[in-house]
Structure formats: structure tokens, C-alpha cells
Amino acid sequence: MVAACQKIAGHAGILRFGDFAIQADAIVISTPEIAGLPYVVSGLVAAGGLAAALSTADGLLLAIANALSHDVYYKMIDKNAPTARRLTIARVLLVGVAVLAAYTASFRPADIVAMVAWAFSLAAAGIFPALVMGIWWKRTSSVAALAGMTVGFGLCLYYLVGTRYYAGSFYETWSVLSSATDAQAARYAELKAAWLAAPDSAAAWKAYDTFAQGIANWFGVKNISAGLFSLPLGFFIIWSVSLMTPGPTAEMRAFIDEIRRPRGRAIFQEKTS
């Protein structure tokens, strides 16, 4: 290992504590062994994590497949499709979405915690404003809801992808909104110059890109919290577009009123004399 460190450009050849790194995903599984607990505890921890991941993934896959088969295929492509065909389409889409998700995850774009946070940010940006406005403001139109979902999701996706995979370009485009100090800006310029001087150097690129990811932001907000920008914009887009487009029909307004009213029976009823 010391010999490997000596071959790294710019390395002193001394094995330091900072040269060791533990993957974030492995910390939870390795904790029982570090604490000296039996191997069965590590197995239970691994099984629990796998069960939690599978249960969450199964629910999301079913929701995505059913939404595509019902809202896209049945509502937009073939409104006369029988139930058997719609069920077959849903199963095919379920397999396709699962394969696509597995293929994307195989590239390990980030650790599991960051990817889960990205998913929640994208869901909040694309769904939450339309859901709230659609139920609690009768003036909300379908065009406005679609516009709000598109803009909110698009902005969140742009922030996630830009700050993670195109950090240098994102920082240079939005440097006025970055939280980078003057010293960090100067350091960024130095690392970029070093990378441009040796474009084939993997070490120079990694140092440049890693540092750029730390300063590529708006007002210091990390990409896992990208929904902070998309949520207000989604609400504003839905509100403004609703005022410029025809409102929902009387039938739709009646349906919204029905959603607001609870329809369950009382379990406990206070008796008054």
C-alpha cells in the first residue's frame, strides 16, 4: 500500500490516516463487527436493510407502472382498452422500469442516502404544488397544474444534474449566486488551470471536479435540498397560469368538494345529556 501511495503524483509516499476511506453504505453493516458482536447481528442488519430497500422499491415500481398504464396508455392512447390488456401493459412497464432503475443505479451516481434525497426532492417539486393547489384552490386549472409540475420538476432536475455532473459549468454560469468565498474562487481558478494544462490527467480532473461540486450551488443550498427552489416556483406557476386559463368545470369543482369532506363513520361519539 505504501508503494502504491508513492506512485501517486504529488504524494509524499507516507501512509496517512486521511488516505483511508470507508464507503458510507458499508458503515451500517460493519458496525456490529467493529463493536465485536456476533456475525448473526451483521446478518440481521443486512437483511433488515435489504427488506427495507425492497419494500420501498416495490411500492414505487407498482405506482409508476400503474400510473403509466392508466394515465398514459389508457387515458391518452387507447381509451377502449380492456382490463386484461391494461394489466398486461402494467406488468410489462413494471419490468421495464425496474430494469431501467437497476441500470441507472449500477453506475453508482452517488451514495444511497443522496439518491433517496434526490428522489424526494424531485417528487416534491413535481407533485406537491399541484396536489395542494388542486385540492385547496378551486380555481386551479389542469393546464396550470401541468405547467407547475413541468417547471418545478425541470428546475429541480437541472439543479441536481448541474451541481453534480457539470459542477464547473454550473458554478461559472451562476457564480454570482454561489456561496463561494474569494479564496475558494481563487482556488477554483487554480485547479481549473491545472486541469486545462494537463487535460488527460485523471488526478487533475478529479481535484477540479470535486472542488467545483463544493461551490456549485445557489445560496449554499446542496443539491439534495433542490426542492427548496422548485416548490415556491411550482406554486407560483400554478397560481399565475390558473389566472390566465379557464377554470375547472362545475363537475370537477363538485368532485374537489367531495374530496375535502370526510366520509368515514364516527368511532367514538360524545354523549350529551
Image (cartoon, rainbow, N blue to C red):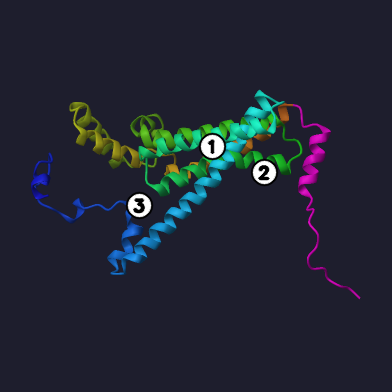
- Residue 73 showing in the rendered view: yes
Where does the image place residue 253, in percent across and percent down from the top left? 80, 38
What residue is shown with label 1? 94
Which residue range is magenta in the image? 246-273
For marks 1 and 3, the one nearer the N-term is 3
Above or below 227: residue 195: above
**Residue 152 at x, y = what percent?**
56, 35
Q: How many numbered circles does the render carry?
A: 3
Few, some or many residues within 10 Å of mark 3 (<14, 14–19, 20+): few
The structure residue drawn at horizontal position 42% and vertical position 38%, both measured from the top left corner, is: 102
> Predominant secondary structure in magenta?
loop
- Which residue corresponds to mark 2? 132
**Residue type for callout 3:** Asp
The residue identified by callout 3 is 25
Taking depth in this image into account, of 2 and 143 the one nearest to the observer is 2
Between 40 and 180, the one lying in front of the other is: 40
User: What is the x, y in percent for residue 55?
Assistant: 51, 51
User: In this image, 164 relative to 15: left or right?
Assistant: right
Residue 39 vertical placement versus 23 (above, below): below
Whether the magenta-drawn stretch holds residue 202 is answered as no
Secondary-structure class at tag 2: helix
* Residue that lies at the very extreme toward the front in this rendered image: 84
